[in-house]
Amino acid sequence: MVFWVFGYGSLVWNPGFEVDEKVIGFIKDYRRVFDLACIDHRGTPEHPARTCTLEECEGSVCWGAAYCVRGGPEKEIAAMEYLERRECEYDHKTLVDFYKEGDSEQPFVTGVIVFTSTPDKISNKYYLGPAPWRTWPHKLQQLFGPCGNNMDYLFLLEKALFDIGHEDDYVIELANEVRKVLGGLSKGKKLSTSSQLHLKSSLSPLKLRTLPEAIAMDS
């Protein structure tokens, strides 16, 4: 068994398991949304964080990284067990076509695994659904889990997508809104150490630009 898994959230910058190949590319007809609860990394069961899941959206492309695991049953089973523990809030393993950067017509790999969630609060207890936009920046800054706060997750995702050359306008807008909140707080009261670090180094606001189309380019 050889398998590929597509990362569009924290897997982009931190796969956490042994991989044999990493390829930058995209999947079609999906987009990122911050509609899934995280209770074990960036939040807690009492105060769940918001992390990425995918929403079906015809015509959209979602950039990220595909990872290949090969080398025998033991290695492959270990990687999948790790992923299932880490992605425990996702209730589906969906198979998709993955397109390598530079070729938008022919899939580079078919049957790539991507962890997704059912967009239904009854059948999926971790699905939060959309939230009022203006409430997000304050909440993301306040929510914490064993791996850090929800704000860290957002900024790390923004940077990871910047590093692979395919920023997501949705992620950039949200990150810039959080920066505005941090800037306002810094004038009125003392910020936490984490917030101070992000305000200084978090990346002066990135400029919005059109999400790259799937065009041929030298990879």
Image (tube, grey):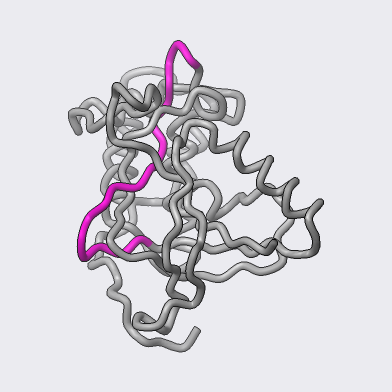
Direction from residue 174 to residue 164 in the image, left or right: right
- Determine the residue positioned at 43% across, 38% down: 199
Image: 81 above or below 195? below
Image quadrant where residue 68 sits:
bottom right
Q: Report the magenta residues as a range.
A: 45-62
Q: Residue 163: image x %, image y %?
A: 49, 64
Residue 49: within the magenta? yes
- Determine the residue positioned at 56% across, 25% down: 40
Q: Residue 102: image x %, image y %?
A: 42, 83
Magenta-drawn stretch, dominant element (helix, strand or loop): strand
- Determine the residue positioned at 49% across, 77% down: 108
Image quadrant where residue 136 sits:
top left
- Residue 126 or residue 164, whichever sits in front: 126
Image quadrant where residue 26 sits:
bottom left
Q: Residue 5: image x %, image y %?
A: 55, 57
Q: Residue 55: image x %, image y %?
A: 29, 47
Image: 23 above or below 32? below
Direction from residue 81 to residue 109 in the image, left or right: left
Image: 48 above or below 176? above
Residue 210: within the magenta? no
- Residue 214 or residue 154, whichever sits in front: 214
Image: 25 above or below 120? below
